[in-house]
Amino acid sequence: MIDNSSRHRKSRVPQRRRALNARSFLVLNVVYLLTLTQFATVTANWIDPDTPSSAHKTRPCHMPPEPKKKFHAAGSTKRSKVPSSSPSSFPTDSPTQSPTLPPAELPPTELYNLVMSDEFNVAGRTFEDGSDPRWTALEKNDYTNNALHYYSASNAFTSDDGDLIIESESREEEFIGFNDKKGTNEINKKYFKSAMLQSWNKFCFTGGIIEAEVELPGKHDVSGLWPAFWLLGNLARHTYVGSTNHVWPWSSQVCTKKADDAQLINGCLNSLHYGLHSKTGRGAPEIDIFEVQPGSAKGSVGKFLNSPVGQPFLSASYQVAPGFNQRPWDGHWPGPGQWYDGLRSGRDTCLNIYFYGSYNHVREDGFEKDYWSDAVSFNHQLLKKHFTTKLKYRLEWELPDDEEGTDGYIRWFINDHFVSQINGTGIVNAGLGTEISSEPMYIIMNTAISKEWGFPSECPANCDCKTYNCNSNKFQEICGFPHGFCEMMNNETAVPQYKVNYVRVYQNPNDPKQKVGCSTPERPTKRYIEGHEDFYKTVNDRKPLKEIVVGGGACSPEASILSNSCGGPTRGVCSGSHTCKCKEGWVGPYCLSHDGYDPIAYEKPDDFGDLEFTGPYLYVQGIALSIFVSITLITLVPVWQKKITAWSRVRN
């Protein structure tokens, strides 16, 4: 007689095993997720979908050949009897061998991939804090460089023509602001408004190529505006003076007496917190792709007597510290050993002899903490066309490589025509401990108005030059301006606009030193910034940057304007509550900005390790393991018990 109960038990064993396997698999997955959450990263990219495919790759521009120095045979007027395979520097009796050798082919260059772009094709974008993943338009006073303007986020927007617009206007702005220099809140008033866009702590890159197509603001022959397109190390946030003290523009890793005294994060420090590396100096050097000074003063005469380049001109600079203590006088050419070697300029370009750098003193510091910073700079002659049409401004930034024994370089181009070059070997050989920057750097675009840039160098007679107000009827408030400036600023039909068609960044995929990210393994910044947030925000800010808004802007389903219709059907929808809901990949209150993230998250999410003690992840893992064991026992013990009990029965 067959025991049916045993048969039934046997048939249920596979079912029990399948159920047990399913439960175990579920538990293992939960444990896996708990233990690996700390390593999760978000991956995406910064490429604007409007960027044409033809612009997704580029190559470095070819450099013109080095100019040959003229050579004259010393003490001899005889011709050589030996024919040469190439032209010689003095005549020969016999002609050069025929046929002549073909010109050498240019060596192939690496192909660079697009890693970030913004085409600004979507009209109505604004850049207030929290509105855009790439850019932040400042809403604050500028206390630097004797600025006469207030930076207003509303002065930066995208136009119907597909341009980013940075607008400068003669308009009064009264505000309660925090004076970074005095350390106090105060009521202030300025009579000009402009805009500055920063990608600080959002998009940064280390090494590569950056270019933008730009039409410069204002008139080519009227001084007073200061448009700029530049890069700055992420450890300093421009206009937030507390973040720049003893950080700008240091680019020195080594330990020196000057660095120990004056560099905040220097190579003499053995123990560092916030994820920084010991004995590795850090800072925020500056690369100016351009700073433009319009005007009508010609080269080789007047105030530009010693320079062939006059107004309007473009300054292309690398600003770095520490600098030379013994340096040329402004307006004079360097003597032997006074300046850097390895500098090279193209046509209509010369060394900027009118600004060699700055002496840096921080209020309440002793003199031993003071330091010079150098502006290794070239001036390039501009024309009217630079202010009436868009041209391409390009920077190529090659990093130093200790393994290869190379020191890097920085090169500038306009419409792919060579402007200037700084060779990193010349920077290193100056013996100051400086180098071409390897810091993650962010992008800045702005137009400033400063009495230090293009304004009369000496105050006109009977003018005190204390207040600058183009809308005033008082002589003392309008007498200090450059000729024609107020007429230009008050022309409501042609307000000065800095127009940008696109910004694109490329990197060499075969160069592991080139990275995207504001905090990289070699140059971390994240924890330092989080530990010193007060340096990077005003007293009225809760955080340096707000979270990016995703939808929520007021809308109308019938609207034809993109900002009122949530970017159109491909970007967002207007909900029943008349607020925007963004589709995947689009952000901002009106879903007008394409989202962007670093392709590699180099730093894990914040944990208790950031507070300098062991975080709870080991305990989380232990708890997860305990839960797994407990669930396993709870599941298995009844099964084993039933199995043992069932198979121990004695048949009748």
Image (cartoon, helix red, strand yellow):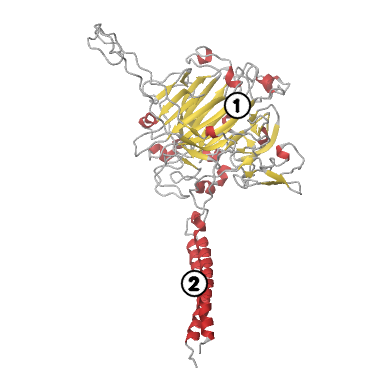
Q: Position of residue 443 (x, y in %)?
A: 54, 35
Q: Amino acid at mark 1?
A: Ser
Determine whether label 1 and label 2 are within 8 Å by CB.
no
Q: Secondary structure at mark 1?
A: loop
Front one among 148 and 522: 522
Image: 602 above or below 1: above
Front one among 42 and 187: 42
The residue shown at (32%, 15%) is 100
> Where on the picture, by quarter, is residue 431?
top left
Front one among 241 and 446: 446
Q: Which residue is mark 1?
A: 450
Front one among 572 and 258: 572
Q: Is residue 246 visible?
A: no
Image: 552 above or below 82: below
Q: Assess disc 2: are there few (<14), some (14-19) or many (≥20) residues with their C-alpha within 10 Å of its C-alpha.
A: few
> Where on the picture, by quarter, is residue 590?
top right
Q: Position of residue 556 (x, y in %)?
A: 76, 42
Farthest-out residue, front: 1
Q: Amino acid at mark 2?
A: Val
The residue shown at (28%, 16%) is 85
Q: Secondary structure at mark 2?
A: helix
Q: Position of residue 652 (x, y in %)?
A: 50, 93
Q: Is residue 511 left or right of residue 446?
A: left
- Of mark 1 and mark 2, the one earlier in the sequence is 1
Farthest-out residue, bottom: 652
Q: Which residue is mark 2?
A: 629
Q: Position of residue 293 (x, y in %)?
A: 56, 22
Q: Is residue 35 left or right of residue 492?
A: left
Q: Is residue 410 left or right of residue 570?
A: left
Number of numbered labels in the structure image: 2
